[in-house]
Image: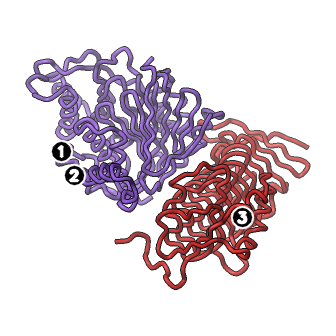
Chain colours: A red, B purple
Amino acid sequence: MAFPTIVPCKKGMARETTIHEGNGIMKITAGLLHFQLLNEQVRETTDAEVVIDNCIGQRYIGSGLGNKHITINGVPGNALGAYLNGATIEVNGNAQDATGDTMNDGRIIIHGSSGDATGYAMRGGRIYVQGNAGYRAGIHMKAYKEKLPVLIIGGKAGSFLGEYQAGGLIVVLGLRQTRDKDYCSFCGTGMHGGKIFLRTDTPPEGLPKQVTVREATVEDLNEIAPYIDEFCAAFGESKEEIIKEKFLVLVPDTKNPYKQLYTHN
Amino acid sequence: MQTIPREGEVRIPSGCAISGIFSKSGKRLSGEGVIKSIATMHDRSNGLGGGFAGYGIYPQHKDLYAFHIFYENKAAKQTCEEYLAKRFEIADCGEIPVKKMLIIKNEPLIWRYFMLPLPKKLEHSLVDEKEFVAQVVTEINTKIQGAFVFSSGKNMGVFKAVGFPEDVGEYYRLEEYSGYCWTAHGRYPTNTPGWWGGAHPFALLDYSIVHNGEISSYDANRRCIEMFGYKCTLLTDTEAITYIIDYLVRKVGLTLEEVASVIAAPFWKEIDRLPEEEKARLTYLRNAFAGMLITGPFSILLGFEGGMMALNDRLKLRSMVVGEKDDMVYIASEECAIRVIEPNVDRIWAPKGGQPVIVTLNGGVR
């Protein structure tokens, strides 16, 4: 059974958006639909599968959701999957800023690049970015007991990677990158927990004093192996290609902890 | 207009949206595209300000200064017009056509003048034409109560009001104008109440600025730029940026890349890592114009005759994305604001903090 629904819209926005329901799949053509109306539909449907076509910047998609599979074609807006609680979100396109803000569980898979503050304060679940991530990826990530957030970036990461990181795993693969001198400036600023894996043999310049860098051990690599598998499955990458290169691991030095609050005065 | 509080009288603790469209071949586009773009980011503004700058929009008067002026009352208009008539030959003037809308309230009188300085007056002023015009703008805005010049360049114009940007665009009937460059702003005032003059873009001569962010160095910047004859009358940070850029480009003669190295200077730690020559150049710029270093989060779009520059603060605390398609360049706070008008961009990327993106006309204005 499929039926079109007319959704009230804000001025200047699309006048009607068709929503087809049936076979456990809800399809929405988002267009210029306001995010609030779009998110209400996504939240209220009993369908386990949601497909959003022509997404144009709607914020907070999938926020707080568990056990749903959301496919987004287009560009989702800021704070995609904020507080995500178990759902899987797959984006065919680029994501904007603050993807997975404070997410608790679930997966966000981006077949493209993501903007600034990807994985902002995430405390569980996995984010896989096929392309690059903007500035401050993994800022304020944290871990607690069984909660271990994981962020894997296929391409390169912007400056301030893992800023104030308190837990969890950040992996930057640098696939298909021409060497970029500015790769990860200010990496690990204020980091005091967790691990950053960089698939490279050169550590980033100007690492903060409290961050130590070493070559990844077998145990380190075993720790990320299941996630690399999942990353490869999502994007059709080759695990052999990925792990044949050297990985560096950045960890905070517990004997010399970060004591500053934000900026040096 | 006088019933709403002015900048500085109220503090509203509370982001903004910017968008720019540029045709490198000088193709002239109506204002509709940029309205559609900025409307996509509706929720980044709160209805307390919207505005646009269009370049190449007055080809019939391209050699004349186009003044756009807000008047709070008829007396202000009379005083200002008497002042202008003594200094300029006014070729054409009239009310700026608007579409009356319930949602746009507290309208001032909005007038437009196409003019050139009187040759005798200009000669006696002992300054060049642009400086003469800039001084007139400062004088009107500081001395004539109730008159505010918000656009003063050639073959360009600023259109702004209190409202959401898509409403402001409709109000000014921007679909009737066409230009090779458009910038737009949706305002979410963070410290100040929002009034017509305080909406973006801020403009002086052909420089216009739209800005998303909040400058923590405002007072240091203001004190510095006021030493060079500028008057920050609006108590908003964006005004200071406009004057700093006018000063560095028009008066000092820096290139736009150098301007970027002054206002979004690299950290000393980064400068130390550079080759000697580059280190010396950046050290000079940081020292010589120390008071013009802008700190705090910002992303700005600077419009000028024949070009547009985008710049982020050095820590990149605000988002900005650049899209390219054939001869078109799109720059916006969010990718969706580009995709909504050009779904099939050739390239889309985010510039680094402090890295200016400068686009200019290749084939002149058509």
Q: Which residue is mark 1?
A: B228
Count neighbours of disc 2 (C-alpha within 10 A) and say few if under 14, some if 14 to 19, many if 20 or more.
some
Q: Is residue A117 above or below residue A147?
A: above
Marker disc for residue A126: 3
- Compare residues B223 and B192 and report the one nearer the observer: B223
Instruction: Name which residue lies at 79% across and 67% down.
Output: A226
Quadrant of the rendering where the N terminus of chain A is positioned: top right
Instruction: Name which residue lies at 59% across and 71% down.
Output: A250
Instruction: State whether residue B49 appears in this view.
Output: no
Q: Where residue B194 sits in the image (x, y, percent)?
A: 38, 47
- Compare residues B124 and A6 and report the one nearer the observer: B124
Instruction: Name which residue lies at 49% across and 39% down.
Output: B19
Instruction: State whether residue B306 appears in this view.
Output: yes
Q: Residues under labels 3 and 2: Cα distance? A: 48 Å
Task: Say whether marks 3 and 1 touch (CB < 8 Å).
Answer: no
Q: Is residue B304 above or below residue B232?
A: above
Give the residue type at disc 2: Cys
Q: Secondary structure at mark 3?
A: strand
Q: Is residue B221 left or right of B44 when viewed as pictured?
A: left
Q: Is residue B336 left or right of B9 when viewed as pictured?
A: right
> On the image, which quarter does residue A138 sit in?
bottom right
Q: Where residue B254 sits in the image (x, y, percent)?
A: 29, 39
> Can marks 1 and 2 be said to lie on one chain?
yes
> On the image, which quarter does residue B290 sit in?
bottom left
Marker disc for residue B224: 2
- Compare residues A92 and B274 and report the one nearer the observer: B274
